[in-house]
Image (tube, grey):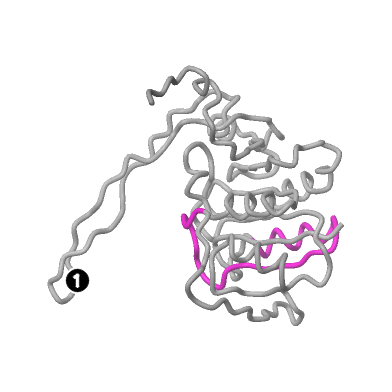
């Protein structure tokens, strides 16, 4: 199996390093990832400036390509220009911080997986429920590799990705996988007014995360309960329930 790996935390993040190491036990791994932090960029694409691919070495060998673009850019340029042979699977992560509930709409990690799916490549997004870059990613990487190894036995539809969220717990504290649906938790946004050294006003996004999903069958609830949440996600946004109930006047 040939696995394309990307992320949104940047090619230097500990999450992608742990993921690559674990996936090498499943198949051949190619890395195409942003050259810097790209969290919360969603599905943005670079259309008005050039993209550059820089070869990155780690541990004395070729690790992958760093791209001066978004996660979705990385997937596109990887598939269309950089990979010498076709990939069989895309794995995006490991993101530092969960991507559950409404957050998946903002997530560069999930959007990279979605871009792969849109380009015909089966895809998995992986996130760890810790924003601390010192948190050990080994357990999350192991669970990601276990899903990757069995992916093609799961018969996932071609319009669907798998979104994994792993609690930041020791391996012996994790209860296993749980299939879940997307929850409804989300941020209550606020903007702090600040002044720069020149006295000019600027705004800094802040706010509070309102975690309301405690149902173990939701992504957020399962993760809180100590499970690795596995959510099949697709981007068919049409509201089929009301499609035939709306009556437009000419």
Residue at the left extreme?
199
Magenta range is 16-42
Residue 115, position as x, y percentages in the image: 63, 54
Residue 219: x and y in percent read 57, 33
Question: What percent of the width, then of the height, locates residue 203?
Answer: 24, 59
Q: Which of these two is toward me, 6 or 50?
A: 50
Which element type, helix, strand or loop, lies under badge 1?
loop
Quarter of the image where one finds residue 92: bottom right
Q: Which residue is drawn at 64% across and 49% down?
A: 126
Residue found at x 63% / y 38% = 233
Q: Nearer the viewer, residue 34 or 229?
A: 34
* The N terminus: image quadrant: bottom right
Name the residue carrying label 1.
196
| Percent x, y of residue 199 | 12, 72
Badge 1, how many Cα within 10 Å: few under 14, some, many 20+? few
Q: Name the side, left or right, on which 51 lies relative to 84.
A: left
Query: Which residue is at the front of the view, 148 or 137?
Result: 148
- As drawn, the residue found furthest toward the front would be 250
Relative horizontal placement of residue 143, taking residue 197 as reference (left or right): right
Residue pictured at 73% horizontal, 55% vertical: 90
28 within the magenta span: yes
Left or right relative to 19: residue 111: left
The image quadrant of residue 196 is: bottom left
Q: Which residue of the protein is positioned furthest toward the top in this rendering?
A: 245
Q: Is residue 79 magenta?
A: no
Tell me the quarter of the image containing the C terminus. top left
């Amino acid at each position: 199996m040939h696995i394309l790996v990307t992320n949104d935390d940047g090619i230097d993040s500990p999450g992608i390093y742990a993921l690559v190491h674990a996936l090498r036990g499943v198949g051949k791994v190619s890395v195409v990832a942003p050259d810097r932090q790209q969290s919360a960029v969603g599905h943005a694409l670079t259309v008005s400036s050039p993209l550059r691919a820089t070869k990155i070495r780690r541990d004395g060998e070729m690790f992958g390509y760093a791209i001066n673009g978004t996660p979705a850019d990385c997937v596109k340029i990887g598939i269309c220009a950089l990979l010498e042979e076709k990939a069989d699977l895309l794995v995006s992560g490991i993101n530092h911080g969960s991507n559950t509930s409404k957050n998946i709409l903002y997530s560069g990690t999930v959007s990279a997986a979605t871009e792969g799916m849109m380009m015909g490549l089966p895809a998995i997004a992986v996130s760890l429920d810790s924003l601390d870059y010192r948190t050990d990613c080994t357990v999350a990487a192991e669970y990601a590799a276990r899903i990757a190894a069995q992916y093609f036995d799961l018969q996932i539809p071609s319009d669907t990705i798998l979104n994994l969220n792993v609690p930041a717990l020791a391996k012996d504290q994790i209860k296993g996988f749980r299939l879940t649906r997307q929850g409804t938790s989300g941020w209550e946004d606020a903007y702090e007014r600040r002044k720069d050294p020149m006295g000019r006003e600027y705004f800094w996004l802040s706010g509070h995360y309102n975690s309301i999903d405690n149902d173990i069958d939701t992504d957020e609830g399962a993760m809180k309960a100590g499970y690795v949440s596995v959510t099949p996600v697709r981007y068919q946004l049409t509201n089929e329930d009301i499609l035939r109930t709306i009556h437009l006047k000419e």
